[in-house]
Image (spheres, helix red, strand yellow):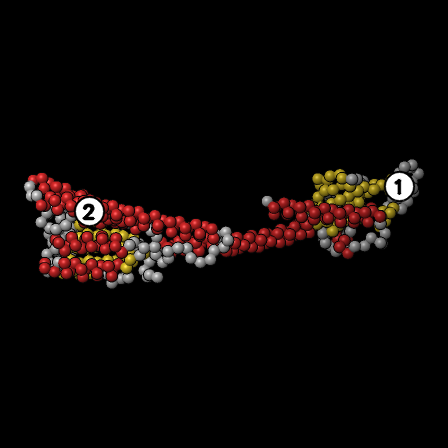
């Protein structure tokens, strides 16, 4: 809209200047015009303008009698007009002048201004005898159109350059102005990936309070979580002592009542262990920056479990050569992978295979054995309800349920299937994957 307004204002200014030029030339032409005693027009030699001398130059004047019968003999035309007569149309009277438009030689569009002048005829005996002439000056509007086009072109390119400059300025301003926020975002990403424990570096005065509050929030969160985990651990240990005493007293007095007490004590111990593990894992996932290298944990577990189950001749193969990193605490990974590997060793005939690899944006740990496997109903019982299928095998029966709960806390999952290449049960654990490499 601004460009249209500027173009309109410039056009009006050019047209007004053009009209002023025509009016000035008309006044000069009238001043140089005189008539003899017969009313014949004479033009003084002082009125000479080169633009009116070139044929079809676009600048024309004519002095024509109003009486058509006198035109052929008494009309006066500029050299540029040659033998053409200009006939104005749409004339509008303003201040004693008639302004209009006309078609000119060579298909030109002319702007015209005219005035009628009356000269007395003294050579006749008739009183008040006079002759009226139409004095007209015209100019080609192509000059106006040319100047307007030039202005519009310059205006267009000016707006283009201005627009590009504004876009560049906005881009630079956004890049530079938002750079501190981008640094905060990158610092938070480093904390999430475990590469830092707090926002590090210098920030502008506008961002420094935000960074300080975030660091304070992170420290407070870690302190609250640590305190809660300590309380849960203390409560669990407090409960274990009375349970141990009850178990000892019951075992010292055999009988149906003692057996019932022992069973309930066992159930209570399993539940305490279960919820203690869940509370510890829930606290761990709320603390930013935890990272654990996966291959070292799996290899350590394989060495320990090989010694524990050495009497059964179980071979544990670990395939985790990639530098995979779990985004969580080491003890939680040991809890989950250790339960899966221990269960596999208990039910395997001779071999357990553990694999760790990338699965898109997740870490996938699969544990399989060459045992008899489980039916779909049995997988539901041990995986979701934590029920034991065989009391002859040592354990609480809550291992897979604990693994599933801890995995869910990290946004992961546990799947059980019978598609193990070794022939037995295959457990697949999906967990969040962190960027490899530690500080």
Q: Nearer the viewer, residue 209 or 15?
A: 209
Q: Quadrant of residue 354?
A: bottom left
Where is residue 295 shown, x and y percent of the image? Answer: 25, 61
On screen, residue 356 above or below 403: below
C-alpha distance separating marks 2 and 1: 137 Å
Residue 114 falls in image quadrant? top right
Q: Nearer the viewer, mark 2 or mark 1?
A: 2
Q: In this figure, what is the number of numbered marks?
A: 2
Q: Position of residue 202 (x, y in %)?
A: 46, 57
- Residue at the right extreme, as displayed: 125
Image quadrant holding the C terminus, namely: bottom left
Is residue 150 found left or right of 210 in the rendered image?
A: right
Asked whether, in this view, residue 189 is left or right of residue 268, the answer is: right
User: Please, what secondary structure does the residue beneath circle 1 have?
Assistant: strand
- Residue 372 place in picture, x, y as percent: 10, 52
SS state under label 2: helix
In the picture of the structure, the residue carrying the numbered disc 1 is 120
Query: What residue is shown at x 32% (from left), y 61% (from top)?
Result: 437
Whether residue 26 is visible here, answered yes or no, is yes
Determine which of the numbered discs, if any, sits on residue 240 in the image: 2
List the single residue furthest toward the bottom. Answer: 321
Position of residue 105 measured from the top left corner of the image (x, y, whole percent): 70, 50
- Which of the marked residues, 2 or 1, is nearer the chain's N terminus? 1
Q: Specify whether residue 387 is in view.
A: no
* 56 sits left or right of 384 in the view: right
Picture quadrant where residue 182 is located: bottom left
List the single residue furthest toward the left: 255
Q: Nearer the viewer, residue 375 or 314?
A: 314
Comparing 260 with 243, the one in front is 243
């Amino acid at each position: 809209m601004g460009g249209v307004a500027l173009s309109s204002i410039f056009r009006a200014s050019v047209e007004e200047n053009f009209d002023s030029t025509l009016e000035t030339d008309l006044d000069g032409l009238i001043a140089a015009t005189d008539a003899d005693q017969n009313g014949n027009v004479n033009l003084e030699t002082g009125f000479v303008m080169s633009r009116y001398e070139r044929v079809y130059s676009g600048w024309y004047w004519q002095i024509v009698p109003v009486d058509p019968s006198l035109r052929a003999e008494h009309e006066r035309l500029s050299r540029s007009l040659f033998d053409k007569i200009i006939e104005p149309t749409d004339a509008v009277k303003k201040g004693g002048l008639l302004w209009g438009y006309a078609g000119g030689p060579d298909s030109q569009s002319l702007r015209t201004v005219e005035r009628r002048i009356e000269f007395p005829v003294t050579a006749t005996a008739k009183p008040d005898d006079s002759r009226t002439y139409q004095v007209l000056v015209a100019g080609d509007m192509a000059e106006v159109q040319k100047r307007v086009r030039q202005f519009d072109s310059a205006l267009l390119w000016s707006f283009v350059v201005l627009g590009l400059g504004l876009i560049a300025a906005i881009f630079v301003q956004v890049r530079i102005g938002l750079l501190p926020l981008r640094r905060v975002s990158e610092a938070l990403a480093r904390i999430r990936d475990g590469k830092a424990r707090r926002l590090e570096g210098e920030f502008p005065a506008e961002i420094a309070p935000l960074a300080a509050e975030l660091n304070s929030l992170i420290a407070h969160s870690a302190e609250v979580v640590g305190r809660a985990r300590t309380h849960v651990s203390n409560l669990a240990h407090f409960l274990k002592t009375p349970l141990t005493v009850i178990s000892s007293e019951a075992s010292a007095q055999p009988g149906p009542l003692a057996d019932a007490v022992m069973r309930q004590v066992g159930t209570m111990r399993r539940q305490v262990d279960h919820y203690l593990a869940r509370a510890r894992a829930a606290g761990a996932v709320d603390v930013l920056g935890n990272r654990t290298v996966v291959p070292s944990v799996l290899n350590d577990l394989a060495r320990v479990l090989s010694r524990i189950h050495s009497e059964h001749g179980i071979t544990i193969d670990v395939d985790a050569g990639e530098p995979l990193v779990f985004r969580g605490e080491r003890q939680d990974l040991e809890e989950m992978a250790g339960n899966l590997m221990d269960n596999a060793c208990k039910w395997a005939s001779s071999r357990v295979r553990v694999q760790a690899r990338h699965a898109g944006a997740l870490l996938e740990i699969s544990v399989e054995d060459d045992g008899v496997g489980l039916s779909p109903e049995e997988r539901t019982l041990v995986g979701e309800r934590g029920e034991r299928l065989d009391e002859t095998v040592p354990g609480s029966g809550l291992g897979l349920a604990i693994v599933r709960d801890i995995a869910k806390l990290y946004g992961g999952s546990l799947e059980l299937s019978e598609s193990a290449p070794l022939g037995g049960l295959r457990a697949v654990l999906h967990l969040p994957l962190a960027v490899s490499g530690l500080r």
